[in-house]
Each structure stands twice: as C-alpha cells, then as structure tokens.
Image (cartoon, helix red, strand yellow):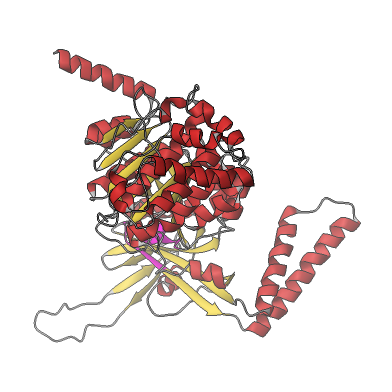
Amino acid sequence: MNRWIKIASGPAVDRRPGAPVGPSGMQVMARRLELPGGVCASFAVAGYPAEVAAGWLEPLLSYPGQLEIALHLEPVPAAVAAARLRRQRGRLESERRAAADHGRLQDPGVEAAVEDATELAARLARAEGRLFRIGLYLTVHAADPDELEAETARVRALAASLLLDAQPVTFRQWQGWVSCLPLGTDLLRMRRIFDTDAAAACFPFGSADLTGTRGPTSVLYGINLASSSPVVWDRFAQENYNSVLLARSGAGKSYLAKLETQRYLLAGVEAAVIDPEDEYAHLAEELGGAYVHLGAPQVRLNPFDLPSAAHPDALTRRALFLHTLAGVLVGDQVPARARAALDTAIMAAYQQAGITTDPRTWRRPAPLLADLVEVLAADPDGAELAAHLVPFVRGTHRALFDGPTTTRPDAHLIVFSLRDLPEELQPVGHLLALDWVWRRVTNPTDLRPRLVVVDEAWLLMQSVHGARFLHRLAKAARKYWVGLTCITQDVDDLLGSDLGRSVIANAATQILLRQAPQVIDRVAEVFHLSAGEAAFLAAAETGEGLLAAGRQRVPFKAIASDRDHQMVTSDPAERSAAQSLRVLRGGS
C-alpha cells in the first residue's frame, strides 16, 4: 500500500471579491505527488553515457510533454579535487596490481578508469579544467495517474536512448519535486563528478542544432537526428564558401550533392558540375540547364582559348595552365629542360596565330595542341615531350583536342559529363572542364554567387599537377564569390597528401557520410571525431552523416520531396520505372 502524507495550508486569507476560498494541498505518495490540477513523478539520473557532445540534452529539453528538468551544479575546490583524484588513482592502481599479482586478466573497465583519472589529474594540475558535482533531475506532469504512467514510460525511454539511467526517487517524491523547482535547492543530493568539458556539454542553453549565420542563400540539408529539427545551412555566409563531401560508395553522396545543387539553384546561385559518371544529366534536363557531353563526337574544349576581356595578364595565365595540362597529359614526367622548351613553344604557338600580349589580338582564333606539338618537335629539348603529346594530336586520344572549341554553354546550371571519355583521359577531362568553369566564374565583369561541384575529385588528385590546380582553386574561390564542392569516395586520395588535406582545411563546410572500416580511423584523426561520432559514421544508413562547420557537428539525414527525389535519384530501378511511366502517359 502506498504511503502518503497530506500537507494542507490554512484557510485562505485573500479577501478580494471573487477570490477562491478553501484549503489547497498535495498528497505525497511513494512514486508520485498529487497536486491541485494533476499529478507528477520525479526521477534522478543515476547513470550517464561515457561520451557526450555539445547540446546532447536537447531531446529532453524539446520533449513535447510537460517535463521539468533541473541541473544542479556545484564546483569542487581544486585542493579537494586533487586529493580525491590521488586516492582514486591509488585505489585503481592497487586493484590493477593485485590482479597482475594473482595472474588474472586485466579488467578493461579498470584500465579505462586509470587512463581517464590520469588524464584528468594532469589537466587539473595545468589548470585546464575543474571538477563539478552535478545532479540531473526530471519531474513529469500529467492530468491523472494513468496518463502519468504513460508519460513517465515515454520520458524514461527517451532518457534511455541518450544512455541516461533515470531512476524514480521512491519515497522522496516531495524532495524531487522541490529540487526541480527554480529555487536552487537540491534536496536529493544524487550527484556525479563531471569535468569542465562534460559540464559545459550539459549546459541547458547548448543546442544540438547549427547556430551559424543564415542568409538569403540558406538551404535545407535534411533533418537533425538528435533534435528532429531541420538542418538549414548557408555556405555563402561562412568565412569561406567551400565544402568537401566524403563518403564510401553507395552512402548517398551524389544524391546529397544533387539535392544541395538543386536547392542552391532555387536560391539564385549559379552552378557548374564536373560529372564523371553522367549522374547529373537528368537534373540538367529537368531544370533547363546546359549539358556538355565531353567524349561525344565533335565536342571539344580548346585549352588555348583566351577571353575577350579579362585580366591584363590573361595570356600569361593561359601559358601557366598549359604547363599544368602538359604535366597531366604526360603523367607529370616533364624534365626541367623540356619545361623550358614548353614555355617557349607555347608563346611561339600564340605568335604564329597572331596573338600577342595586346588584348586586342585575343579575339583571333586560338592555336591548337597540334600547333604546340609542331613547335616542340622542332626544338631538340622539346622533341621528347612532343613525342609524348603525339597520341593527343594524331593518335587515339585526339578527340578532345582535334579542333577549336565547339560549344560555349551559358546557363544557370552547366553540367560537363565525362563518362564517355576513356579512362586515360578522365583526369584531362576533369582539368579542361574545371578550367573552363573557372575562367567563367573569375570574369570580373560578371560576379555573382556560384557553386562549382567536382564529383569524384580523386580522379584529379591522381596527378600532381591536377592536385595543385584544385588546391589553387580551393584557396582562391572566395575572392570570386564561388563555393567549391569536392566530392570523393576515395578518401585516402585527399587525406594522403598535403595538397588534399589543404583542400579540406580550406572548406568551412565538411560533410561526412558513411565511411569504410578501412579509413574510419584516418577520418576520425583528421576531423577530430569522438569515438561515438566515428562509430556513427561507420554504421550510418544511406543518406545519414555529419555536417561539420567549425566546432559544430550535427548528425543529419538528407530528405527530399517526391518530386526532388525523382530528379536526383540514380537508382536504375527507379529511373527505369519513371521512364516507363512517362512513356505510358505519353502513349495515352
């Protein structure tokens, strides 16, 4: 039988007209309180997760029912904390040595506790943190006992999902209720020791949502898995506009990239996509964009083209890019003497076409790669390099360079498809398309917010010259109001080189989807992931990941409407079914 105590006040003394007259009170029972107008039950948190992130209490704070949460925090004096840590380390060390003396296996829990206590003692000694006594209490309110039972079950399930052990304060319900009132009084005194970082993560004003500046180009990325709120982010309101998207094959990286591109287009941002797998063709068709099919007959981009109006040193910049192109074409094997001959030959080829440093001559037809090879072949120092370039002029790889530029796309969305290029020409196609896009976005007379998406960036990173070119773009993009998006499934190609890591460092927005077990440790090291975040990425479902911006990290799941899904999905079965449906509708 429940024990209860009735606490009643005396007669009311409010003599105003219409004031209620009569006693008010509560019934204190073993597992609940009966208050005027309802019932409540209090719980104390007795167990906590081993690792938490900022704003981890957000699911409790945003609980839709009537739930009171009290966090009592009391600092522990430094001298007391140091003495207690010494005693605790001594007990743990004694336990570990006793196990070793008796030939027992070491307890992993004891080993972890020893390491944590040692690290915490070192931080306290360096004044890098403090210890706090923290008590976390919950009070659930309802209209009647039956509803209270259902509400407490939901709250305890939510707490369990956060790895919190919420225990009812049996026979201490009144103390629990008072401890949750805004009085600063802790009558339960059920506390745990936290360090500074853990205490800060519990702070009730911390949020599991992104708190960055939002602007007119904010777009929806998905739903926050921690708080169920929308994840809205504006890359163009950050210190730089670049982004990297890293994921294993099948994790949904292209799906998310297409969603992001589509939503930035709706926000008025122009986009250009380097597409090695022809995944963006349907999106370009649906949104009225331009589609450049490199590798198709009579589709060429002449790397010698000069802008009609640009920087005064545009010819010099073209010459420098042609050095990069030659390095990619011959596999980065350009000797020093050949580089000198190449520089002379580039300027000679332009002069033969009547083009000089005078911008008025830049409207004349530009030379071709064949002209450069002809000049190189006449120079003894450049003959070997010319021989390496012959397949791209008269051989099997000549399709891209067999004449002047055949297409000059101009649209709000431009997609360069590289799927039909031979594997040997994929890095070259990446470079040519990216160079064409970069010349467009750096036009000083036409500055506007733009997005440049480089899918499968690992193809470009395979070449030293290609990696350097991508690195330069990542560093210079902000000056031209451009956000560069690098997408790759071969994470080691970015993380395994200084240039790749610099590309990541120059991206204020970093998106990590599911990672392969072979690279998760490297990813965790580079992005400073906690053990929980690394485990989440290793087991994430398709479309789930982390959006990292500075010190903020949000677990999210990409979402799309049915119409958006039809435009961005790459699933062959879904695409085939949609095409069949369109045919049937057309036939009817």
- Position above or below: 82 against 520: below
**Residue 375: in magenta span:** no
Give the camera-side residue of 294 and 126: 294
* Residue 508 at least partly seen: no
* Residue 278 at least partly seen: yes
| Residue positioned most to the left | 17
Q: Residue at x 20, y 87 (%)?
A: 13
Q: Position of residue 31 (x, y in %)?
A: 44, 61
Location of residue 339 (image quadrant): top right
Q: Is residue 262 left or right of residue 417?
A: left
Q: Is residue 562 left or right of residue 484?
A: left
Where are the magenta residues, as a range? Answer: 55-69
Q: Residue at x 54, y 67 (%)?
A: 198
Q: Is residue 142 left or right of residue 468?
A: left
- Position above or below: 560 against 109: above
Q: Residue at x 55, y 47 (%)?
A: 494
Task: Work out which quarter of the rendered image holds the C terminus and state it.
Answer: top left
Give the camera-side residue of 202 and 124: 124
| Residue positioned most to the top | 587
Give the camera-side residue of 117 and 555: 555
Q: Is residue 572 left or right of residue 460?
A: left
Q: Position of residue 98 (x, y in %)?
A: 86, 60
Image label count: 0
Q: Position of residue 455 (x, y in %)?
A: 43, 39
Give the camera-side residue of 169 and 451: 451
**Residue 65: in magenta span:** yes
Q: Residue at x 74, y 59 (%)?
A: 110
Q: Position of residue 572 (x, y in %)?
A: 38, 23
Location of residue 178 (image quadrant): bottom left
